[in-house]
Amino acid sequence: MTIANRYSQPSSTSPFQDDVLDGLTRQRKALPSRWLYDERGSELFEAITTLPEYYPTRTETGILRDCASSIASVVERGAALVEYGAGASTKTHIVLDALNSPRYYVPIDISGDFLLAAAKRIETAYPALDVAPRIADFLRTVSLPQKIQAVPRLGFFPGSTIGNLSDLEIHTYLARSKASLGQGARFLLGYDLRKAAETLIPAYDDAQGVTAAFNLNILARINRELNADFDLSRFRHVAVWNESQSRIEMHLESLGRQTVTIGSVKVRFEAGETIHTENSRKFSWDTMRRMCTAAGWSTLREYTDCAEQFAVVLLGSDDETS
C-alpha cells in the first residue's frame, strides 16, 4: 500500500474560511498561525530555517545530535515515533537513527502535499519502517494508528512551534497528546528560551526578506482559496518583541487605507492597521516545567546548548523523575 492511500485528508477548507472571516472582521485583526503553512508557506519556512539570523533550527539540531543516545536510552526497542507538525522532517533522521530498531513513524502536519513528500523521503531512507502520515491539525484530536499502541511510543514536537500557542492551547495540546500516545509513552519537546531582543528580532525579520515572503504568503493563499483581492504590495511584514508577553509578534501592516473583498465580504483597513499572524513565545525553564506538569507529563531529562539559547526536554507520561 502506498503512502497516498494511508493518510486521511480534511473533508473541506471551511475551517480556513471560517478563521479568516472571523479573524479579519474583528476590531483587532488576526489570523491563526497554522494557516501560514500551505505548501508554499512550508517551503518558505524551510528556507527560513537555513538563514544565518535564524538560530533555533541549527541550535536544536545540535542539541539533538549531542543528546540522541541519551534520549534513545529511555525508549525501548521497536518504538513508534509520532511527530507533531512534522513539516519536512529534517530532524527526524537524528531521532530515528538513535532509536533501537524503530518500527513506525507517524508524521502529522496540516500541509498535505508537503507532508506526503517528506513522508515518502523517510520511507525511502528507512525501508523497514512503517510510515503512516496523518494530514491533520495537531491542535485538534488526532486519530493515531491502532497498531502503534502495542509498541513503545515517543512523541516528538521539535522546532519551538509550541511557542506559537497560548497557555490554554499548550495545556490542551500536551494533555491530548498524553492521552492519545497512552500510558508509558515518552515525549520529546523543543522550545525557545528567553534572550535579548537584539538576537530575536533579526531571526524573525531577516535581511533577505524570506520571513516577509512567508508572512505575506497567507494573503496570497486567501486570494487563491477564498476568492479575495489582497494587493500584497500594500502590506508589509513587521516583527516586534513584546516584553510583557515574552514573545515575538509577527504582523502584516496595511500601508494605506484600503478595502479588501473576500468572497462577498468587504474588509476595511486603516493605514497602519495590522493583521496579527503569529506569536513566537520564549520560555523560562520553570515556566515550561510547570506547563508540562499541569498537563500530566513528568520531566525526565533536560538538554540545552552551551549558550542556553534553546531547550529540549524529554517527558514521561507517568510519575517518573529524572
Image (cartoon, rainbow, N blue to C red):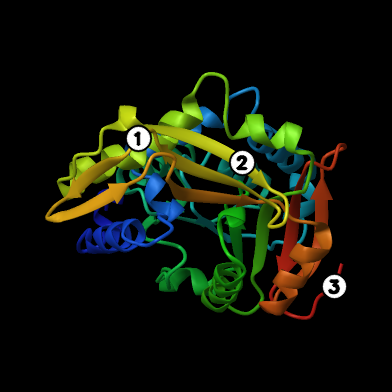
Which of the two residues, 268 or 110, is positioned nearer the viewer here? 268
Q: Which SS class for mark 3?
A: loop
Query: The disc labelled 3 sits on which kind of residue?
Result: Thr
Residue 124 in view? no
Residue 144 picture location, percent across and down: 43, 69
Q: Nearer the viewer, mark 2 or mark 3?
A: 2
Above or below, 130 against 321 in this view is above
Residue appearing at x 72%, y 50% in the figure: 243
Image: 170 above or below 175: above
Residue underneath mark 3: 321
Distance from the alpha carbon under mark 2 to that under mark 1: 20 Å
Q: Find the distance from the CA under tag 2 to the CA under tag 3.
A: 38 Å
Q: Which type of secondary structure does the marked residue at label 2 adopt? A: strand
In terms of depth relative to the viewer, which is nearer, 251 or 124? 251
For the residue marked with disc 2, what is the amino acid?
A: Val
Number of residues whose C-alpha sits closer than 10 Å to that of mark 2, classed few (under 14), some (14–19) or many (20 or more): some
Q: Residues within 10 Å of mark 1 (few under 14, many from 20)?
A: few
Query: What residue is pinned by disc 2?
Result: 240
Residue located at (38% from left, 33% from top): 255
Q: Position of residue 102 (x, y in %)?
A: 57, 54
| Residue linked to disc 1 | 256
Q: Earlier in the sequence, mark 2 or mark 1?
A: 2
Tell which residue pokes out farthest to the top in this image.
208
Q: Indicate the quadrant containing the C terminus: top left, top right, bottom left or bottom right.
A: bottom right
The residues tagged by marks 1 and 3 sit, at their Cα atoms, a distance apart of 55 Å
Name which of mark 2 and mark 3 comes first in the sequence.
2
